[in-house]
Image: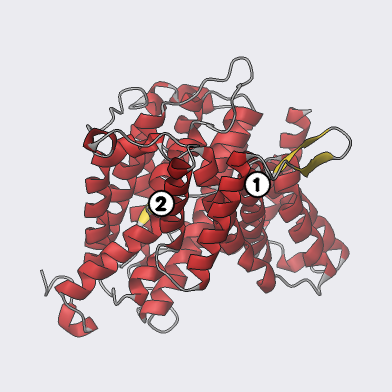
Amino acid sequence: MKKYFRFEELGTNYRTEFMAGMTTFLAMAYILFVNPATLALLDIEQLPEGVTRIDQGAVFTATAIAAAVGSLIMGVLAKYPIALAPGMGLNAFFAYTVVLGYGIPWETALAGVLASGLIFIVLTVTGLREKVINAIPANLKLAVGAGIGLFIAFIGLQSSGIIQNNDATLVGIGDLTAPTTMLAIFGIVVSIVLLTLGIKGGIFFGMILTSIAGMVTGLINPPSGLGGIVGEVPSVAPTFGQAFIHFGDIFTLEMLVVILTFLFVDFFDTAGTLVAVSTQAGLMKDNKLPRAGRALFADSAATVVGSVVGTSTTTSYIESTAGVAAGGRTGFTSVVTAGFFLLALFFSPLLGVVTAEVTAPALIVVGVLMSASLKNIDWDQFEIAVPAFFTIIAMPLTYSIATGIAVGFIFYPITMIMKGRIKEIHPIMYLLFVIFILYFIFLS
């Protein structure tokens, strides 16, 4: 085992790797509760006619399985200390844009996730992934990440009651004295304080403290005994295999845009996370990432597995940097994280404690972290600033990640051509320009 993971070469040991794996798990454990709440649209009390709610328990199990499988493949095959789980932003796109906005059944949405995962595998195996990634301008990639951050934060502010509907101005400040809203504000403050102090797993611990505060104040029903904490693993029967059953429903222009969005965002998340974590761990060689193909395969394979059992796109987590900071240098760190996700399967009864007010702070804080990419956009170049701005602002204002990407990708070739930088536009961008124009025509 030591030889396989090159412990001596990388200057690590079992204890260090175990602690690193546990640290990574604690830093990203919030997804076990946030993902089911998001996909099940728990903050939407009354769903529109024809929209059904995915089973929360099944998504909890699917989340843990997808995270465990992805992290295990990453650790054993790619040998990187990078953990995976269903991605924030991608789950919001799945729930709020595809299911709630477009009215597409969640079963068909899972089929779209499966399709994007299969395409990702093909692109990885054939080596085309690099061409696709390189075709998308760096500034637009950064804008997509920042826009998703604003979108997630907006969802959190809305579900917490801090921001609410206002007929005169569309949105406005909510009733901050409402008990549940005050609980969410408490969670935001606690999470921010913990992260500011550099505490690993600050988001997760913030959720725990918020849940405790909710139980103390009577806003959340406490678990009854040990059975309210540890229980049987929820069945995935309600979601298992639905992606296969409804695969024939994805062949529409609307679903094409959905699949492309799943694919693009996963591409950006994975590529950025791999580079960031590997650089911090000192694993980059000559500015290149060894075994990059295997790492990308782990991501795409986990997405396929996750879609089959019942969750949105699985991607590499930037929270893996917490484990690296704790000393993790090998794939054994990810193996340990995978083990903790499997162990977490038996704690599903806690889903009843993690309400919308508890998950809202996590959404807002993750939004803050994702918005950090704003600083790297070339705002001084107007031809770049325009598509970047529209990509970012359109996501929260239209309540759609896909629409934000579409608007930005339409404006990019227009401004670049007018600026005389036509040679810098990759042919793939022209194809996407046409697809997204048709997308808006189709929506109208």
Q: Relative to 192, is 139 on the left or the right? A: right
> Residue type at mark 2?
Ile
| In the rendered image, the vertical position of residue 289 relative to residue 25, given as above or below | below
Would you say the residues marked 2 and 1 are in contact, meaning their CB atoms lie under 8 Å apart? no
> Going 46% across and 56% down the picture, which residue do you hit?
206
Dot label at residue 193: none
> Going 33% across and 33% down the picture, which residue do you hit?
309
Name the spot of residue 369 as percent of width and height, x first.
57, 63
Q: Relative to 309, is 98 on the left or the right? A: right
Residue designated by label 1: 157
Question: Which one is earlier in the sequence, the residue at label 2 or at label 1?
Answer: 1
Name the spot of residue 114 as percent of width and height, x first.
42, 37
| In the rendered image, the vertical position of residue 246 relative to residue 376, given as above or below | above
Q: Distance between the residues labelled 2 and 1?
A: 19 Å
> Residue type at mark 1?
Leu
Name the spot of residue 215 as percent of width and height, x first.
43, 41
Furthest toward the front, the residue is 217
| Nearer-the-camera pick, 79 or 153 | 153
| Nearer-the-camera pick, 349 or 142 | 349
Q: Relative to 213, is 234 on the left or the right? A: left
Mark 2 is surrounded, within 10 Å at the Cα level, by few (under 14), some (14 to 19) or many (20 or more) other residues, namely: some
Residue designated by label 2: 208
Secondary structure under the numbered disc 1 in the rendered image? helix
Secondary structure under the numbered disc 2 in the rendered image? helix
Name the spot of residue 313 as percent of width and height, x first.
45, 44
Which quadrant holds the N terminus?
A: bottom left
| Nearer-the-camera pick, 181 or 163 | 181
Which quadrant holds the C terminus?
A: top right
Q: Is residue 313 visible?
A: no
> Quarter-wise, where is residue 76 in the image?
bottom left
> Quarter-wise, where is residue 427 in the image?
bottom right
